[in-house]
Amino acid sequence: MNIGRRSFLGLAAATGAAGCLSKPTPAGAVGGKDENLTVFVTDIHVSGLPDAFPKPCERLARFVDEVLAMNPRPARVVSLGDLAYLHGLPEDYAKSKPILKKLEDAGIELAFAMGNHDRRSAFKEAWPEYVAKSPVPGRIVNIISLGTADLVVLDGLQGSDERARTDMGPGQAKLFPDVFAWCKKELPKRERPFFVCAHWPVQEFTYPVKGKAKTSDLAQWLGRNAPQCKGYIYGHLHRWRPEWIHLGWKSSQTLRTLCLPSNGLWGDIGYATFRTSADRAVCALELRDFYFPREPETAARPAAWKVKVEETRGQCVTFLYDRGEPLG
Ligand SMILES: [Fe+2]
């Protein structure tokens, strides 16, 4: 079939609208790096102890090789927390740093969120220049460009850095007053589309409603107060899980949320690419495996694991920058 240029462009636009099926032209690609391409990875869980469980570290090395083999390469890689194995030890970050540094050495920007298995002071020993960028003292918060949109990285890590080496710390997140005050100051006024990310589901970030014996959560606040917020991305649950949150019965607007797989500990195993364009961002799953509770040493695997991978592989989520009718 002979397709003219006009027809070809029309076809390209149509397939672009199909989201996951599209392979958008990397319009932002410069010198082999695409400014509109980001890779999200989370729950890396590398241990630096001598008798450590080795699989997460092997998976991290494989992940880095895969990113470096991409053409074009992403402009940035964002880790959504639980970079450390369980206790946030300095040894954990020392072990993963040289592997991640290969990305930085290749000109790929790195960004990090804190998870419940992390420890800020130990992370800071490995990545002091990253911690120094945070606009909220004592927390690890950041805003980075994703190409046609921005990413707001929030910190909800509770507990003290002074806890015992064997103390995993609290699993639940907190919307700290200083982080929320920064959100109130910075997010409503933003003019470009942006996404919010953190380690935990957005519903864990709650705050008291003045004068009432109830709480609201960050999703509702973002939906009502930050019109340029186009979605929320997180880890923690070790699974690919797209959802949407409604923002009340007087609006057709929803806020899409997406949980990403662990890179190598348990559950859905893999990472995700995130491509921004003029009117949307498409997050595509790169699933590599499924196992629970551990990757087996032998090839013998329950049949259900294989079915799970086949069902999940190749999925994507499209975040339109037009979120629909605003709240009335
Ligand atoms: Fe985790």
Image (spheres, rainbow, N blue to C red):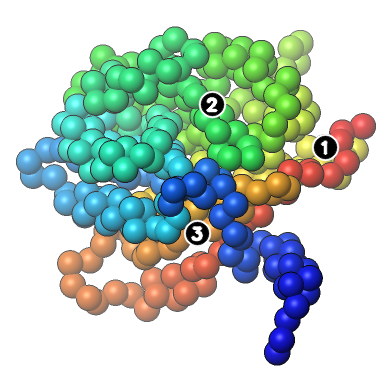
Picture coordinates of residue 266, whole percent (x, y): 34, 55
- Name the residue that disc number 1 marks: 248
Comparing labels 1 and 2, the label whose residue is closer to the camera: 2
Q: Are marks 2 and 3 in contact (CB under 8 Å)?
A: no
Q: Amino acid at mark 2?
A: Ile
Mark 3 lies on a secondary structure that is strand
Marked residue nearer the N-terminal end (3 or 1): 1
In this rendering, the label closer to the viewer, 2 or 3? 2
The residue singled out by tag 3 in the image is 285
Quadrant of the rendered image containing residue 190: top right
Looking at the image, residue 104 sits to the left or right of residue 154; the answer is left
For the residue carrying disc 3, how many other residues have a C-alpha within 10 Å: few (<14), some (14-19), or many (20+)?
Answer: many
Q: Work out whether 163 lies above or below 63.
A: above
How many discs mark residues in the rendered view?
3
Which of the image's four quarters has the N terminus? bottom right
Residue 73 tag number: none
Q: How far across and down, in percent of the image, does residue 242 sit?
A: 60, 53
Q: Name the outermost residue toward the front.
A: 5
Residue sitting at x 63%, y 37%: 149
Residue 55 visible in the shown view: yes
Q: Which residue is mark 2?
A: 143
